[in-house]
Each structure stands twice: as C-alpha cells, then as structure tokens.
Image: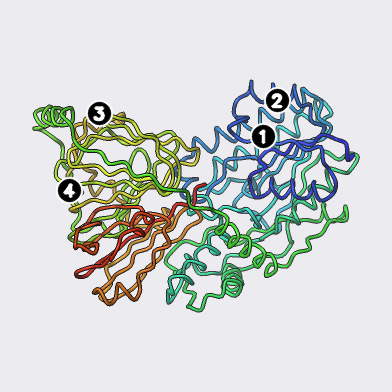
Amino acid sequence: MEKTDKIYTAGHNGLIGSAILRRLAKDGYANTITRGHAELDLCNQSQVHSFFEKEKPDYVFFAAGKVGGVFANKTYRADFIYENLMMQCNVINSAFQHEVKKLIFLSSADAYPKNFEEPIREDALLTGPLEATCEPFALAKVCGMKMCEAYNRQYGTDFVVVIAPNVYGPNQRYDMLNAQVLPSLIKRFHEAKLANLKQVVIWGTGKPVRDFLFVDDLVDACMLLAERSSGADYFNVGTGHGYKIVELARSINKAVGYKGKIVFDASKPDGVHKKLLNISKIRQLGWKPRTKLIDGISISYNSYLEELKKKQVRASRIHNITAGQKDQRSLLKVMRKSKNLATYAQPKSYRDKVVIKPWGYEFLAFENRYAAVWLLFISKGNSTSMHCHPEKKTSLIILSGTAMSNTLASRNYLKGGDALILDKGVFHSTKVLSQDGMYLLEIESPPMKTDLVRLEDKYGRETSGYEGISEMKTDNLKEYGYFNFREPASHGKIVRETDKFTVIFEMFINQVDFKKHFKNDGIGLYTSCRGRLLDNENKIVLGAGDTQKAGTLATVQGLHISGKMILMKTYSKDK
C-alpha cells in the first residue's frame, strides 16, 4: 500500500472505522476518502456503484455494518440481516467491478458456531449452529466472508477477511440498545458513581470468559494485512487470552473509581460459557496484541468522559399547542364510533414493566399523584398513532433524535432538547426522522395511562384502548435500558445519565432546602413533578406537569417554593 494510494474507509464514524482513519493519518496516508450516510447509503446499489465509479479507490477497509446489543438483535432481526447483506453485497461487488487492489473485510466472532472447541480456528466456519440471539447479524457476516472467498476464487481478487472478538476503545457506543458488555459496564459504573449507588448488579455468575481486543491492536493487524503483497484469506485477530466477566467488572470498577459493591445475579443467563479465537495464523505474520486490558479500559473511560464533555447541549425550543375546533369535532366523532372500544386488563402498577408497542416500547420512569413520567423509544421510520388524551395535559420532551410532530392544525419539527406541550384533547402523532430512532419523555398530568383516544393508527389499533398486561414485559428489563425513580422522603438528587441524554430528579422539602441546594446552569429543561415554582410576586412560573427552559427560569426574580417540590431536569446531548 503506497502513500499515494486512494483509500476508502466504509463506516468511518464507528469504533473501528474511526480508528483506521486515525492510523492512516498517523502513518502519512493523506489520500483518504469517507462518506457519511446522508451522502452515501451503502444499502443503495446505484449510489455505491456511482461512488466507486467516480472515486476509484485503490484500497477499501469495510468496517460498516448495522450492529446492536441483545435487545436490538432480538427485535430488529430483519433489519440486521437485510441492511448488513445489502451493504456487503454492494461494496464487495463494486470493489471487484472497479478493480480495487485490496479490500479488508471486518467480520465478527459471532460468525462462528456457538458450541465449538476453544480456541476457535478459521476453518470452524459453518461447522455448527450459530448463537440464536445474534443469528441474523452473524448470518450476514458469514455471507460477507463467503462472498469475499468466492470473488477471490473466481476473479482472483485480493479480499481479506479479519475476524475479531469483542472490540473496544475510543468512539464506541454506550447506549443500552447498541453497547456490548465492556462499554455498557463503563457507562453503568460511571452512572452508579455519579448517583452514589451502593451496588451495581450484573447479569449472570461472572464466570463466562470473553476476549476483549483494543481497537488500535485490531487496526495494527488490518494495516499489516493491507500492506502485504498478497494473501486473500481469513485471519482471526484477538488477544489469545480470555477474561472472566468478573475480572472485567473489577478492572472497569478500578478505572472508574466506583466505591460500591459489584453483585452478580446468578438467576440471569450467562450466555456462551467461553469464546476465544485461535490467533496462530496472524501471529505467524509477526502481529501480536500490545494493549493490556486495564490500560485499554483506562483509555476508553477517559475517552468516554471527553465525549460527554464535547456533546454540547443545544438551545431548547418549546411548542405550546391548544385544542381547536378540529380536535373537538374529531373527539366527538371518535367517541360516537367507539362505544364498543376494546379495553384490556391493566396492572395495579406500571412499575417494573416495559410496554411493547408496534413502534418500539415505553416504561414508567416516575409517578406520584401529580404527574407520571414515561420514557419512550420509537424505532427508525415508525410513528405513534394520531391520538389525544381528553382528561390530561401531556408534555413531550425529546431526549435524543429528530421527529416530525403532527396535530390536526400544525406540524413541528423537533430535535433533542425540544419540548411539545399539549393541552387536553389535542390530537397528535410523532414520526421519527433520525436513523437510530429517538428517545423522549412523556409527562402526564394527572397520571391516567388509559386516558387515550385514537383517531388514526397505521397498526390497526383505532378501536383499541391502552395495551394490556399481555403486552407488558416483566423480565430482562435491562435490555430496554429500564430505570425507575421513586419519590424520596427527604432532599435527594437522583441522576440517570447516558451518552445520549441526562435526566435528574431532585426533591426539595421546603424553601430553606431549595435555597441551599437548587443550582440552575441555564441549560436544558425543567419540569415540575410536584409543587410549584413562584416568583417574587408569588406568581406561578412552573406548576405540576409544566415544562420550562432552564434559561428562562434563570431570569426570574425571587424564585422560590411554598412546599415540597420535585423538579426533573433534562439535557439532550444531541448537537
């Protein structure tokens, strides 16, 4: 690979792709090209062909792919197999058609059978069944590997396959839907440290063994294989050494500085007991891993902290929507038709449950007699029904992602940090525009979950009430990022922080408490879950269920409370 060669990295925004770009720049390869999803959809054959025809890259690093955690793999199985197959087919075929000198295809250890004698050699491919939870993703990777092999045999191409274990490092994903075990534990220990939690509970016994490879070591192997004159083949890349999950947890705990206990829940599944790769083939070429686990974790945690600092909170916008004549007429029309509305048995409490929706899921994060706070995740391309709540006011706070909100009278485009305040009886629907779906909070005041009337619904639920117990999950809630705050008896602050958003609940007992502890940095949104904020003339500036910009409240003179107050503060980390 010459310094003047044109090098295309597919997936340059991800963990591995970004590390490849850093290494290319460090080694003096200046003729690099990248394209974001908005510029080049790798699932679009025509776009990919046109890109290769125009740019004519000499080398390709294929690090693109749809990846995710256990929940995403279980829920979006069709998306995982379709999108990964399309990206691989389009790039590999275009690389052949436009005479790319060499392509490095990044695959995963998930492509190997779930039950195989350790350590796994490259010839173990297709010798047994795959792990069921990630089968669609794994099948797509197997197809990509076999496609490279087929093109090499038929056309003499130089397409090299690199199979990696659990890869970690800077620029990895930490959200519950997409994170693997190491970054998810970094996030969990960090959040536990901030919230002063007494313990962190980890699924399983802690005994399963996994291989964790620092991303820069993987890139070393990719560069070595790219710079070789020939050698179309499969290569396992790993550390050759396994770590028990309990060892991993202790190392992360040490790096983060969390002081609480680590508890393993043996009632939860462990998964595959042991999975290690045989790396003798790549070692024969002179490659070996350089980064110790504790050093890699420290680098990753520091990078995580830097990422949190860099994610600036954008200025919020609040849209207030009141019910109009169209809403009133539509409500009467629906109510006349809905005499036989199907209703479903509801639980005594919505706590410790996740409600599965055709567009995603939702769960109760906080509730008292004044307000209820629900977290919703709406997946890519989906939308809620056109519905209203005749007896309660509703606020929607966008935590992450972009959306189009429609009412019968208006349309609003919302981004992370924005809020939509809906009066009683306003029909509305929310459609996701962002590629990764969106997270939002729904604040109900007063709490009445079954107060729901649907006007239109593409999922056929117009004549149905709120989902019943049969649509509610009570197990494996961590897969959905479940959390729930309970009202404390005295002053206290509870923090829920992810790489996409932060939610803070704080209880103030009285004005003395409020004056001592309330700090407003002017960023984000405040919502009252109990009590009222008053100005120096005792006028209400924030009542129960109301939402207001922190910056607006910072300008209020003589801000005070008259009794117990629970304030929820939200930050979006979208740029």
Of badges 4 and 3, nearer the viewer stands 3
- What type is the residue that disc 4 sits on? Ala
Give how far apart the Cα atoms at labels 1 and 2 are.
9 Å
Q: Which residue is mark 2?
A: 51
Query: Which tag, 4 or 2, sits closer to the chain's start?
Result: 2
Q: Are marks 1 and 2 in contact (CB under 8 Å)?
A: yes
Mark 4 residue crowding within 10 angstroms, few (<14) / some (14–19) / many (20+):
few
Of badges 4 and 2, nearer the viewer stands 2
- What type is the residue that disc 3 sits on? Leu
Q: Position of residue 41 (x, y in %)?
A: 60, 30
Question: Residue 460, relative to residue 3: is it above or below?
Answer: above
The residue at the point 24 percent across, 49 percent down is 469
Query: Which tag, 4 or 1, sits closer to the chain's start?
Result: 1
Q: Which residue is mark 4?
A: 345
Give how far apart the Cα atoms at labels 1 and 3 are.
38 Å
Q: Position of residue 557 (x, y in %)?
A: 30, 62
Q: Position of residue 252 (x, y in %)?
A: 59, 69
Task: Identify the secondary structure beneath mark 1.
Answer: loop
